[in-house]
Image (cartoon, coloured by chain):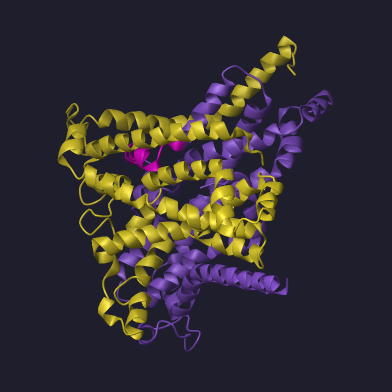
Amino acid sequence: MVKSYPSRLKRRMARQGWLSVIPALLFILAVRGYPLIFGFIKSFTDWTGIGAGNNVGLNNYIHILTGSEFWTLLRNTLIFLTFIPIQLIIGLLVAVLLYEEVWGWKFFRVVFYIPQIISALVIGYLFSIFFGYNGPINKILTEIGLGALKTEWLGNTASAVAIIIFCLVWINIGWQAMLGLGGLASVSPSVFEAAEIDGASFWKRFFFVTLPMLGRTIEYSCVISVIWVFTGIFPYIFSMTKGGPGYDTTTIDYMIYLQSFGSVSNPGYASALAMILLVIVLTFTVIQMRVSNKANDWGD
Amino acid sequence: MRSRTTKQKLTQALVFLILMVLALSFLYPIFYMGINSFKTKIEYRKGNFAMPQSLDFTNYNLLIRNFKILDAFGNTFIIAIFSVLISLIIAIFASYAFAKLKFRGRMFVYLFIISTMFIPAQVTMIPLYYLMSDVHLNNTLTSVIITYVATSLPGTILLMTTSFSGISDEMIEAATIDGAGYFKVVRKIVIPMGMAAIAINIIFNFLGASNDLFTPMILIQKMEKRTVMVALASLMNSRGGDPPYQLAGLTFSALPPLIVYIVFSKFIVKGITVGSIK
């Protein structure tokens, strides 16, 4: 239904409308828009934070893409991404069990979400204490006679990467399960009942009925999780490995921090790195918007 | 028939057991952190898993008296409260306009604001740091508040606009005909009707602001202005030889969000299933 308002009312509405959104717009232009443009301009300079810096053209970008650890950082992020399928399987399994209202499901639902509530920094430090040389994991190993396995878990590449991936799965199980529950709620229960009457086993039902029905939820959580790995795991890296050993667990966003506020001060160079990160994230955002456009009929 | 129900019961028990193990993996670290925070260094080295011999608050006393952690809590609290409130007020008016007022450019401005949600904080942080120094806001709580307002606005506006769109136009029109002005409509209709969305935004923005490390770590260097997370990072870096002391710090900083969660858990769980925020 299209409504028509008299023009006097229309003008008043337009004035009220603009006045209502201007504060939000100003905040965002000043704190997100202006720094973005400023950073873009500085990404073509050798700016050190003092003065204006000299124009160096595309040198920062060329150096990042050809002569730096950038590809190592990208490789690290890609390896971390393997947490997503694990998170999906475990999270959605949990969602199905919660959906079937197994005994204690309300309690489990609250508990599984705890890692999303506590600060990422606290969780990262807890991991670093648990996997520290004198930490509980090594204590248990010693006590059950596997003292030979005692090691600095976060100090060597293979185990550090494995622990970070484990951590990413662990903190996101609850999130994934909640998302799965939301998805399941929009599927008609008769679908699951039909499969059950047909005598399909639990696993058959899970892989051939439930997962396909949750296609959109899966797409959505994949894209969100990819963006999150590129931009959201800074506090975990900061508290668990500081990007080490070497650069083996450093991600792009952590490198931006190191290059601008860490041991060196190369904000011009770091800005170029930031622009590359932005392009990566925007690419996935566009994919995400396609996905959520398709998923507009989710309902809630 | 009977064997089948026994089998079902067994499966149920097994499922419960697996979920319980998973639940314990979330609860045990918190429990571990709590009990060991009451131990001395020596007691901790002797046994990580035993209950503490006595409820010794020395670590907490040190955190409060020497480490001044309550000052950090004060700073975090000020930042969280003000950023949440300012963002909320701005977002309520903006979302009302996006949802209910027709004006040219509305869709464009809306999409522009929402799209800034996808600009990573790391991308704008470097210039922002120098910008804050230029306007002499470096080392102030204000700089962090301003940043949080801007970063939380898009998500808040997105959820609230969706929620406010559900308010019936007839209701607003009827109020307008009765002589209610702009502010009265917002106060008497929009806010009460959108209360669920408003509340969930308050909780999540509050948790987000108090759990964040990156922004205050960059914008604030002064000891007396640091937030809990920044203080925690320095505690963890400097006191590696004293795990119980560190665990006391971790427990202290994990408590406020946990309390908020326990109090509002029912509500939060409902909110996530609808909004699925990350």
Chain B tint as drawn? purple
Quick check: B88 above or below B232?
Answer: above
Residue nearer the viewer, A205 or A16: A205
Q: Give me the residue at 53% from left, 24% from top.
A: B109
- Toward the viewer: A140 or A203? A203
Name the residue at the top extreme: A7
B110 horizontally vs A45: left or right = right
Q: Inspect this view and state whether residue A59 appears.
A: yes
Q: Main secondary structure of the magenta part?
A: helix
Quadrant of the drawing holding the C terminus of chain A:
top right
Q: Quadrant of residue A30?
A: top left
Query: A92 or B83, which is in the foreground?
Result: A92
Q: Quick one: which chain is yellow?
A: A
Task: Report the quarter where the N terminus of chain A lies.
Answer: top right
Of residues B135 and A133, the one nearer the viewer is: A133
Instruction: Report whether B85 appears left or right of B174.
Output: left
- Residue occupying image coordinates x 34% and y 48%: B218
Q: Quadrant of residue B23?
A: bottom right
Q: Residue at x 73, y 71 (%)?
A: B1
- Start-end of magenta stretch: B118-133
> Relative to B13, is A262 above or below?
above
Examine the structure image and report whether residue A249 is included in the region drawn in magenta.
no
Q: How many marks?
A: 0
